[in-house]
């Protein structure tokens, strides 16, 4: 599975959120496997680097449900990490990668530190609340007890486009 393959699964979850009237953010957690990077032809005479996880297993999927559940913590990645902990029967998510369509907020990035994930891959940056490099960088704060790798911008245009369209439609409906 490439990072793009996993992000497409997260985008499927984001679509499910939108269908429920929720902000379209989705997440998946992949456990195990070996991380890889390889060069592939880009179709234009050049090459591109493709990253992913060989042999990993999707152990959790979730999407935003804050409105539906009336729960301020019901963010896609937060719910997916909780589901992954239950599926793996452990609170430490060592060996796991979280894929999420929008850069995590402070709450979700804090849970990533506390659950000891190995890596987070996100789609669109969040200029108003991003805590993995945009406003803050919780993933590499030496004052905390855990650091993890971050891969930003995977399918960023698709992830951001879905959010833009959702809010455009919402504004149009209100007008």
Image (spheres, rainbow, N blue to C red):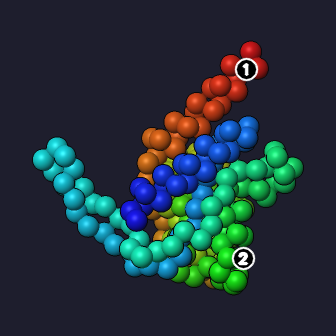
Left or right? Give the position of 115 relative to 161. right
Question: Mark 1 = which residue?
Answer: 173
Residue 48 x %, y %: 24, 55
Residue 60 x %, y %: 62, 67
Is residue 137 at all visible to an observer of this figure? no
Q: Residues within 10 Å of mark 2 (few under 14, many from 20)?
A: few
Q: Residue at x 49, y 79 (%)?
A: 32
Front-most of residues 2 and 128: 2
Q: Secondary structure at mark 1?
A: helix
Q: Secondary structure at mark 2?
A: helix
Mark number, residue 164:
none
Front-most of residues 50 and 144: 50
Earlier in the chain: of badge 1 and badge 2, it is 2
Q: Residue furthest left?
A: 45
Residue 102 x %, y %: 58, 50
Question: Mark 2 = which residue?
Answer: 86
Is residue 7 at all visible to an observer of this figure? yes
Q: Residues within 10 Å of mark 1 (few under 14, many from 20)?
A: few
Left or right? Give the position of 7 relative to 60. left
- The total number of labels drawn is 2
Between label 1 and label 2, give the one nearer the viewer. 2
Q: CA distance from mark 1 to mark 2?
A: 39 Å
Location of residue 89 (image quadrant): bottom right
Left or right? Give the position of 139 relative to 38. right
């Amino acid at each position: 599975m490439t990072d793009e393959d996993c992000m497409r699964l997260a985008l499927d979850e984001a679509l499910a959120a939108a269908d429920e009237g929720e902000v379209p953010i989705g997440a998946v957690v992949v456990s195990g496997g070996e991380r890889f990077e390889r060069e592939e032809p880009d179709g234009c005479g050049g090459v591109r680097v493709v990253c992913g996880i060989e042999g990993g297993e999707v152990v959790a999927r979730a999407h935003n449900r804050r409105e539906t559940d009336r729960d301020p913590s019901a963010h896609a990645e937060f719910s997916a990490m909780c589901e992954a902990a239950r599926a793996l029967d452990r609170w430490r998510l060592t060996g796991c990668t979280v894929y999420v369509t929008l850069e995590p907020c402070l709450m979700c990035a804090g849970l990533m530190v506390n659950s000891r994930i190995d890596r987070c891959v996100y789609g669109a940056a969040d200029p108003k609340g991003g805590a993995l490099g945009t406003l803050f960088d919780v993933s590499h704060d030496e004052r905390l007890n855990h650091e993890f790798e971050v891969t930003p911008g995977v399918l960023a245009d698709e992830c951001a486009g879905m959010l833009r369209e959702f809010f455009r439609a919402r504004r149009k409906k209100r007008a």
